[in-house]
Amino acid sequence: MRGAFDPETLRFLRAVFDEACLALTPKQNTPGMRSKLAERILNRASEGGRDPVRLRTYALMDVLPTAIKQAS
């Protein structure tokens, strides 16, 4: 079971999630894909990750591998 996040952290994670969703194409922006992004962000955050760029990049790695490689 994951630990709980405080309200400030939840706002932060929501902002990271929203930014990650902006990287999706309209075709990719499905409830299932959004759920996958949220799960990946929460998993990494539960491990202590708090860097917004790294969280967003991690969430998008499987979705946009070409775009992420080009940004590196």
Image (tube, rainbow, N blue to C red):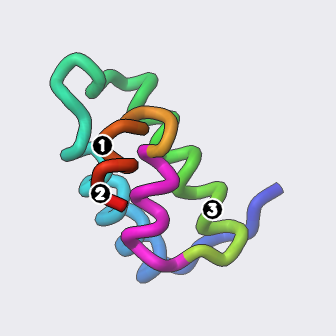
Residue at 45% across, 23% down:
32
Residue plotted at (23% across, 44% down): 23
The prevailing secondary structure element of the residues shown in magenta is helix
Instruction: Using residue 70 as the reference point, say whether residue 56 is left or right of it.
Output: right
Q: Residues within 10 Å of mark 2 (few under 14, many from 20)?
A: few
Q: Earlier in the sequence, mark 2 or mark 3?
A: 3
Q: Residue 43, how many percent across, how many down? A: 65, 56
Mark 2 vs 3: CB contact within 8 A: no
Q: CA distance from mark 2 to mark 1?
A: 6 Å
Q: Amino acid at mark 3?
A: Arg
Circle count: 3
User: Is label 2 in contact with label 1 (beta carbons under 8 Å)?
Assistant: yes
Quickly name the residue at label 1: 67
Tell me what residue is drawn at x 39 percent, y 49 percent. 69
- Residue 2 lies, with reference to residue 48, above or below; the image says above
Judging from the image, what secondary structure is the residue with disc 1 in?
helix
The residue identified by callout 3 is: 44
Q: Which span of residues is magenta-colored?
A: 50-60
Q: As shown in the figure, which amino acid type bears the numbered disc 1? A: Ala
Indicate whether 60 appears above or below 72.
above
Whole-percent x and y of residue 25? 19, 28
Q: Which mark is residue 71?
A: 2
Which quadrant of the figure has residue 34?
top left
Closer to the camera: disc 1 or disc 3? 1
